[in-house]
Amino acid sequence: MPWLTSPLAIVIVVSLVVGLLMVVLFGYTSDQKAIGIAKDQLKAHLLAVRLYRDQIPVVMGSYGKILRGTGRYLKLAFKPLLYVIIPITLLMVQIDRYLGQTPIPANVPLLLTVHLAGQTNALNDVTLDLPTEVTMTASPVHIPAENEIVWRLAGTNDGKYEVKVVAGGQSVAKTVCIGNDLPRISTIRLRGQFWKRMFSSAEPAIPDTSPIESISISYPDRNIEIAGYGMNWIWMFFILSMAAGFVFKELLGIQI
């Protein structure tokens, strides 16, 4: 069934699984008894504010206890949240490689931008080595102020291809995804910048000896359609996983 491998189905399944894992992991790594006591105390102080709203000293004392109780609850929840947030963030980065952008359709122009490191006069010496399935549809545009060159290309057949950028006697490859499937897409390839590469690139680092600092491709963002309304998969994932988490916490009796 094709709909089972559609972006919408993938997001729904991943959201349900992550919602369950969040709740189970939180319950396993947290002090459930202490969290339950902290929540009960907060409810009691909030009730006191409502019951004794005409007695200012009691209300002010209750507000102070609410602030202290909130701090105690956040302290109890902070460590388990770290255990939950870190793996989920890394998972979302990987899923975004597949669902964040769409491949370029065949015979539709795409822009490939090469940025050279530092102030260099080597822009005119940068060339492209293209596979037979990818063609250049216009002359490159040089932007000296930004130290960049932009090429307009187009793929003739669906698939993943390597475009090689030659600069300073070195060749650096950049993957180009053509078609309408769900390939693993990397919008940019970078030199160095470890943390930026971790979150924005799915390709190996450009060698430090290369004058090329980055090679990027302008892929269109993917929107998942629901009832005629397009939504980024991350927003959908956030809403569905939170909803699933609240359902599972009630079913499993876990305090959050």
Image (spheres, rainbow, N blue to C red):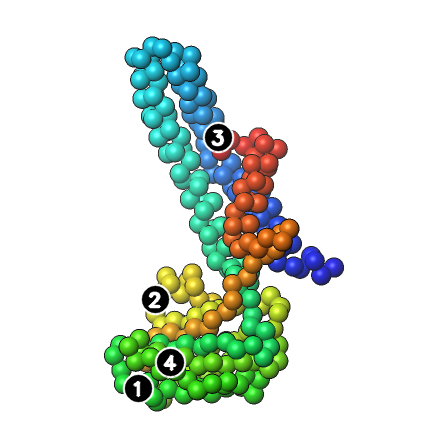
Against 161, residue 229 (above or below) is: above
Against 144, residue 197 (above or below) is: above
- Which of the labelled discs sits on residue 193, or is there none? 2
Determine the residue positioned at 39% across, 33% down.
74
- Which of the labelled discs sits on residue 19, or is there none? none
Can you tell which quarter of the image residue 161 is in? bottom right
- Which of the labelled discs sits on residue 122, or is there none? 1
Local secondary structure at mark 2: loop
Local secondary structure at mark 4: strand
Residue that numbered label 3 is attached to: 32
Would you call the spot at circle 3 few (<14 residues within 10 Å), some (14-19), or many (20 or more)?
Answer: some
- Which of the labelled discs sits on residue 149, or is there none? 4
* Image coordinates for residue 165, horizontal then vertical, percent: 42, 83
Inter-mark Cα distance, 1 to 3: 62 Å
Give the foreground label among 1 and 4.
Answer: 4
Determine the residue positioned at 55% across, 50% down.
236
On the rendered image, what quadrant is the N terminus found in?
bottom right
